[in-house]
Amino acid sequence: MTDPAANCLFCRIIRGDIPAKKVYEDDHVFAFEDINPQAPTHVLVIPRKHFAGLKEAQSQDAEIIGRCQLAAAEIARRRKIEQGYRTVLNVGPGAGQSVFHLHVHLIGGRPLAWPPG
Ligand code: 5GP
Ligand code: ZN
């Protein structure tokens, strides 16, 4: 069976095959600047372990999803955007998911309207 990580864009970024501006990393999580930022801070926080998205996540992935959220909070703290920021998981093409390696968007540094589009 083909390894889904082999051709996954974000797995390739983690491996260093594709350059990205690294923001944060630890044993479980990797974070980098979004190539098409929608706000002054737009960082993608991803698990090192490949899985396609929230829909595909299983109970054993609960901890790593939490770690991604906590890494986003730490990045927001360091960037002093805690007055207001958003963490977003786009789930499925209908919600705009275009890369099928789970990623948390950290968006902030400007006023954020609600509801999102
Ligand atoms: P999605 O649309 O799946 O929720 O989010 C994918 C995000 O990945 C988009 O915000 C897009 O700008 C970003 N992205 C796509 N390709 C690359 C890339 O090669 N490098 C980086 N740094 N970001 C990317
Ligand atoms: Zn991947």
Image (cartoon, rainbow, N blue to C red):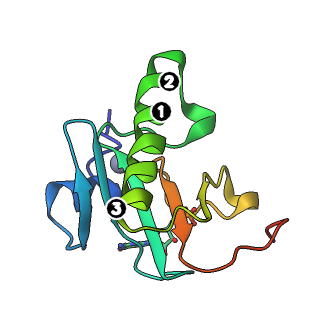
Mark 1–mark 2 contact, CB under 8 Å? yes
Q: Nearer the viewer, mark 3 or mark 1?
A: 3
Q: Which one is in front, 40 or 90?
A: 40
> Residue furthest toward the top?
59
Image quarter hosting the C terminus: bottom right
Position of residue 69 measured from the top left corner of the image (x, y, whole percent): 48, 43
Pointer 1 residue: 66
Q: Is residue 69 above or below residue 33?
A: above
Pointer 2 residue: 62
Q: Earlier in the sequence, mark 3 or mark 1?
A: 1
Mark 3–mark 2 contact, CB under 8 Å? no
Position of residue 100 measured from the top left corner of the image (x, y, whole percent): 49, 52
Q: Which mark is residue 13?
A: none
Q: Which mark is residue 78?
A: 3
Q: Residues within 10 Å of mark 2 (few under 14, many from 20)?
A: few
> Residue furthest toward the left?
16
Q: Which one is in front, 43 or 7?
A: 43
